[in-house]
Image (cartoon, coloured by chain):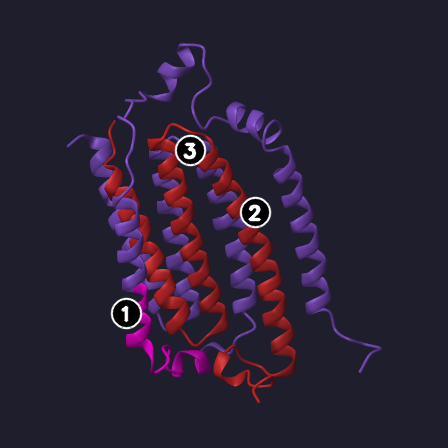
Amino acid sequence: MSLLTAIFYYLAAASVASALFAVTRKNPVHSMLWVLALFLHVAGIFLLLGAEFLAAVQVIVYAGAILVFYLFVVMLLDLPVEVERPRFGSHWPIAAAVGACFAVLIWLAQAQMRYPPIIDHGPAVERAAMGSPARGSLAEIGAALFGPFAFPFELVSLVLLAAIVGAVVLARKRSSAA
Amino acid sequence: MNLPVDAIQGLSAVLFGIGGFGFLARRNIILMFISVEVMLNAVNLSLAGFAWFLDDLRGQILALFVIALAAAEAGVGLGLVIALNRNKPGAAVADVTKLKW
């Protein structure tokens, strides 16, 4: 087992553990911090998968922006009351069964997948030395985003604009209307 | 380096299951949203894994779009939470019964 494989198994175990803690902690702030640990570990796995830009976006957008937004909204909660409340509904065993079924279903679905023989990608440095941009490098992702994926890319900006307007409309205090 | 294919997809499946369990079981709307984020992360992991094993960049691009849409979802969802909070403090979904017949 190489060092990188060992690192992968550490990251996988740590992300499963932090996901479990994130959905089961009583205190919402603790949940947020466990989810932060999950995001950082998943970013580490992205790095192992040669998705450097994706890892950076994961840390900046997810761990940075989205999580801070969630923490900000958690401040609206009355934490002592929240900690006293039952965290799960009475139907939680059914929920656990559904979650387990989903996981098994996904596992069975991907077990049918036939992969081409795995190419040993080699480190990004070697690929760069050969003159081709590294897979997942910023240059390649940028060329793809503004080339074949230009239309969906622009569409996403429209969706984000709609989400900004929608969030402001929803959260605004209604002054004139009843 | 040869990462095991099954391990990545299996990890993604387990994370998705945990997120689904959290979404169905938690009674706090903010933690339900957090569970959705866990599920989205599991999907991103799966996409990045496919991009690696099939040597195809499209998986990573799709994962980027998923992250952008997760940001949009968080914005609208938490806007809804703030609007709900104005009418009734607290984030327990059991208290939101206005539309119940």
Give the percent coordinates (x, y) of residue B31: 45, 68
How busy is the neighbourhood of tag 1: few (under 14 within 10 Å), some, or many (20 plus)?
some
**Quick check: marks 3 and 1 in contact, CB under 8 Å?**
no
Kindly identify which numbered label has been placed on residue A97: 1
Kindly identify which numbered label has been placed on residue B68: 2
Name the mark nearer the viewer: 3 or 1: 1
Task: Report the Cα–Cα distance between label 3 and label 2.
Answer: 16 Å
**Quick check: marks 3 and 2 in contact, CB under 8 Å?**
no
Q: Amino acid at mark 2?
A: Ala
First of labels 3, 1 by sequence position: 3
Identify residue for label 3: A51
Do tags 2 and 1 sit on the same chain? no
| Quadrant placement of the C terminus of chain A | bottom right
Q: What hue does chain A carry in this figure?
A: purple
Q: Secondary structure at mark 2?
A: helix
Q: Quadrant of residue B37?
A: bottom left
Mark 2 falls within which chain?
A: B
Q: Amino acid at mark 3?
A: Ala
Q: What hue does chain B carry in this figure?
A: red
Residue B13 sits above or below residue A137 on the image: below
Residue A50 sits above or below residue A9 on the image: above
Q: Quadrant of residue A3?
A: top left
Q: Secondary structure at mark 1?
A: helix
Mark 3 falls within which chain?
A: A
In front here: A93 or A13? A93
Q: Secondary structure at mark 3?
A: loop
Q: What residue appears at the point 38 percent right and 30 percent down from the top-left corner?
A: A50
Give the percent coordinates (x, y) of residue A166: 69, 61
Task: Report the Cα–Cα distance between label 2 and label 1.
Answer: 30 Å
Q: Main secondary structure of the magenta part?
A: helix
Give the percent coordinates (x, y) of residue A149: 59, 33
| Quadrant placement of the N terminus of chain A | top left
